[in-house]
Image (cartoon, rainbow, N blue to C red):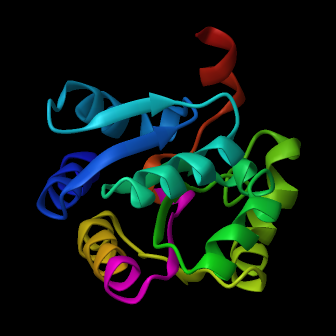
Amino acid sequence: MWPEAIHRELGAAKIRVVGYVPDGGHKRLIELCQADKSMRAVVLSTEEEGIGLATGAWLGGERSVLLMQSSGVGNVINALGTIKECRFPLVTIVTMRGEEGEFNPWQVPMGQATRTVLEAMGTIVHRPATAEEVAPTVNAALRLAYNSYASVAVLIPQRVIGIKSFQEQTSQ
């Protein structure tokens, strides 16, 4: 499964801090990070806090990643200016919404704009097409970010995380 493969990549890259806003698409990866004694999983009240967390981790000598849903990308835009101007490495793993089969119309605008918005703020964007491509793409993003002090995002398509339905949401 791709969450386990991402977790292995994070461990191999010596990621020690994982910031996240609770997200069903990242549920398994979050659980793995929480259980990993070499990582500190930090729940955030807003995605923007993750930029400060990542900045502080880097200044403290640690590597981090930020996990979020595409709807949270809009919350980090101003804070991404810090990353760009100070040349801090940042890896963001984004589960996409607002794509094929989306049941929630509120997810569509940011889901469709995520790549463009991130690129406008100087973030390099990678998007694996299949579940098998997720871990190698995360590996490449980690290497690129931490070797070149860049902001790199990996967008995990909705078809990889699973297309949610209205029935699933109302029955939970």
- The answer to whether residue 119 is above or below residue 70 is below
The location of residue 56, given as percent across then percent down, is 49, 51
Q: Nearer the viewer, residue 76 or 117?
A: 76
Residue 143, compared with residue 26, is above or below; it is below
Q: Which residues are magenta?
A: 144-159
Which residue appears at 30% of the width and 81% of the height? 140
Going 53% across and 57% down the picture, which residue do you hit? 55
Q: Is residue 91 left or right of residue 49?
A: left
Let me know if residue 146 is in the magenta part.
yes
* The quarter of the displayed image where residue 148 is located: bottom left
- Answer left or right for 125 relative to 139: right
Q: How many marks?
A: 0
Name the residue at the front extreme: 60
Question: Residue 28's quadrant in the figure?
Answer: top left
| Image point (17%, 32%), residue name | 36
Q: Nearer the viewer, residue 33 or 98?
A: 33
- Residue 12, placed above or below residue 142: above
Tell me residue 23's x, y (percent).
Answer: 55, 34
